[in-house]
Every structure is written in structure tokens, then in C-alpha cells.
Image (spheres, helix red, strand yellow):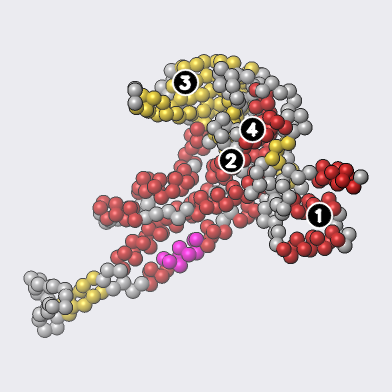
Amino acid sequence: MSVSQRTLRCQKYYDDRELIRAVRGGTEALRNAGIKYLPKEPGESADSYKRRLARSFLTNYTDKTAKNLASKPFTRPIVVKSERFQELADEYVKAVDGKGTSLTGLSSTVFEDALWNGSSFIAVDCAVQGGRPYAYHLSGDHILGYRLDEDDRLTEIRIQEKAVVGDGEWGEKEVTRVRVFKRDGELVTWSLYNEDGTAIVVDQAFALKEVPVVAVHSSAVVASGELFAAPPLKDLAFMNLQHYQESSDQSNILRIARVPVLFASGVADDAAIAIGSEYAIKGESGADLKYVEHSGAAIGAGRDSLKDLEAKMQSYGSDMLENNGAVETATGRSLRAGETNNRVAMIALNLASAVERVLGWIAYFNKVAEPDFNVDINTEYGINSAPEELTALANARTMGDLSQEDYLQELKRRGLLRNDFSISDNQDRLTTELT
């Protein structure tokens, strides 16, 4: 097979997410797909179908759910702490991709993509001539093939890259290339190919000892030898497609029902029928002329069906925020029983571990040995900071029923203290002030 072809596993990943890509693309993507997602009815003319398709639109509950869940870990910015390299950490927190994107912004994009596709990726690179290393989001859609060793570490990955380049003096064109990373022990090389397989650069030494791609999974369990997890919102995407189709039917039947049909019986075939207050229609004895209208029963049933489906979609995803006891993440970091333990928090910790690994690679490019970056990401969702609760906490502290440390921890959980607030540092400062 050629370097630009997908392997069977990557092709299956791509095919399995065809509906997800369509729903993610919104109304325009579904309309462009035509009869694939909005079937043409038997006897429906091409012109009628074209008009019905142009009137159909997607109310994107899947996108709304993904964005809502993905916003939870980023109600507070990501904080990176380092005992020895805080200045480097601060630099990359502000701009991590060389284009001004913050670490929180990149992480938010990766997190939302993991909700859609099950897995998302962060890659690290640096200009051949040196310069500032950078990290960027890599979608699973652009992974053409990969190989893992017995420890499920990447030994090879092929990535599809698209870029707009100059074409002549004024024009431009899109080109597709394939970047390949290979690892043999601790030696990593990279190559670059045109889409037709011709080599641009082959087997150039790479500065890192690992293939610079790390996965962020939406599941705690990923099968050994696999790089992708199942998409958690796929069932919601199917419901959203059903809603798109039923909404199209409902809109179409309403359009038909709004126009009454003139019914005539006992009138000569060649009789002239004109509608208006200045006209009269003359018929034979027993002739009948009347408007026939839709009873509306089917319209009501269709509306009820849409409402039921909308209620299901609006509640979908809430289980991902439900606490279920201690949770082990895919990267081996645990959510403690006292924390908000849910699937969204689990993905957030997977992301935090991935970001720590990415920052370690960036540190290696910067000739930093033994980096000690610690990534703090919000895993507390839905915690109430109503005045009554804050008053109850303050009273418990005043009465001596709550320690100072626990009181400050609760304030931090509710976002009243910054997420890099250190209770121990605060205690040290208080001690200094008292002396």
C-alpha cells in the first residue's frame, strides 16, 4: 500500500465516524450528503425533493452537548506548576502552538474532539533549523496508520497534513503531504512525502526519543494494541439524525396542510372555475364544490414525537457528570472518592497527563533535564456556591466544626479562590504576618 493510504484499522476508525463528521458539520454537511441522511420518498419528484432538502435544517443537540461538557474543565484556566522551570511553564501556558494559542485554548479543542471522536491527540514538533518547539492538535481523522510495541508505545505513525501554498505569482493551492515518524529503540526519525508517494525528506533524525504524539481518550479502557476509543456521543448523533429527518417530515406536512385543496364533484370537465368574490360557479343539479383540509391529527402526533426526542437529547450526556465513586483514568491517575468523580473529570485527568508529557517533550527541546511540570485542571463540576452554602461554611468554620484547611479547600472548589491558590503558602504568609 502507498504511504498516503489508510490501514484497515484507521480506515475503520474513519468509516465508523462518518455520521459524527456529518452531524458535526451541521446543516450544510447534511444537505450536501443529500439522500444519504435525508431519504427521498417513493414517488417524490427530483424537484420536490430538492425543495424539501433546502428547507430541512439540523438543530444540533450533539454539538450543544459536546460544547457544554467540554466547557466544564475550563471554567478556570489550566495552571502549570514547576519548582525549577516556572518561567518556561508560564511561557507555554500563554502560547503553546507558536501562533498565540494558549495552553487552555489548545486543551479545550483537544477535549471537545475527544468527546466527539472518542480519542484526540496532541503532537509536538520543532523547525528543522531550530527555534521554538510547539504543540498542536492532531485529529484522529488525519492518522493514516500506526504501529505499537508490546508496551503500547508508538513505534511508527503516518499523519496526513494539508496546507495552502503559493501557486504562481498570485494564486494559491492546497497540497496534501504525509509526515512519518519512526522509532527504533531511542532513535526517532521523520520523513515527509507527497500525496503520490514521492519522497521530500527521508529518515531525518528527530530530537526526541519518543514519537511525539500523545492520545487523550474519553474512556478509561482502550484495548491493547489500539490507539482509538469509542466515541461517547455516537448514540446522540443517531438521535440527532432522526430528529433532522422527522423535523423535515414535519415541516413538509405543515406546508402541505396549510394549503387547502378545492374539491369539485358533478361539475363538467370543461367548466371554468375561478376563485374570488366577483365570480360565480354554475354547476349541474347535485354538483358539489368545497375545500378539503387536513385533519391535523398526524401533525400533532409528529410534533409529540419530536418533543419526546428533544427531551431525550437534552438530557443526554448528563450521566457523564454523575458521580460514580473512585475512577481510574486511562493514564493511571485516580480521582479520589471525595472529589467529583465522573467521566468528564476522568477525561480531564487524561488530558492533564497528556499535557504534562507534551511539556516534558518541549522541555527536552529546550535542553531542560528532568522537568517537573505539574498540570492542574478543574475536575469540580456542578458545585454550588449559593449564598446559603457559603454562609453555612462560614458558620461551621466560626463554630470550630471545620478546619481552616478544609474551609479554604471548599472555597477553592467553588471557584472563589484561584485554582493555583496554595493553602500551605497561605499558611506561611499568615505566620509571617503574625510575627
Which mark is nearer the camera, 4 or 3?
Answer: 4
Helix, strand or loop at label 3? It is: strand
Q: In the image, residue 152 lies at what x, y percent?
A: 65, 30
Q: Answer yes or no: do the residues labelled 3 and 1 have beta carbons within 8 Å?
A: no
Residue 93 against residue 35 in the figure, above or below: above
Residue 255 picture location, percent across and down: 31, 64
Question: Marks 4 and 2, Cα distance to the nearest angstrom?
Answer: 12 Å
- The residue under label 3 is 193
Q: Please check the rendered image and state whether residue 56 is part of the magenta-colored stretch, yes or no.
A: no
Q: Position of residue 267 (x, y in %)?
A: 12, 76
Mark 3 or mark 1: which is in front? 1
Determine the CA span between mark 2 and mark 1: 31 Å
Q: Is residue 95 visible?
A: yes
Q: Which is nearer the eye, 86 or 18?
A: 86
Name the residue that disc number 4 marks: 92
The first of marks 4 and 3 along the sequence is: 4
**Residue 308, magenta (yes or no):** yes
Q: Which residues, given as a range, are shown in magenta? A: 302-310
Q: Mark 2 points at which residue?
A: 105
Crowd class of label 3 (few under 14; some 14 to 19; many from 20; radius 10 Å): some
**Image quadrant of residue 128?**
top right
Quadrant of image for the C terminus: top right
Q: Residue at x 41, y 50 (%)?
A: 27
Residue 226 visible in this rendered orientation of the protein = no
What residue type is disc 1 on? Tyr
Classify residue 138 as left or right of residue 198: right
Residue denoted by label 1: 407
Q: Which residue is drawn at 75% across and 61% down?
A: 390
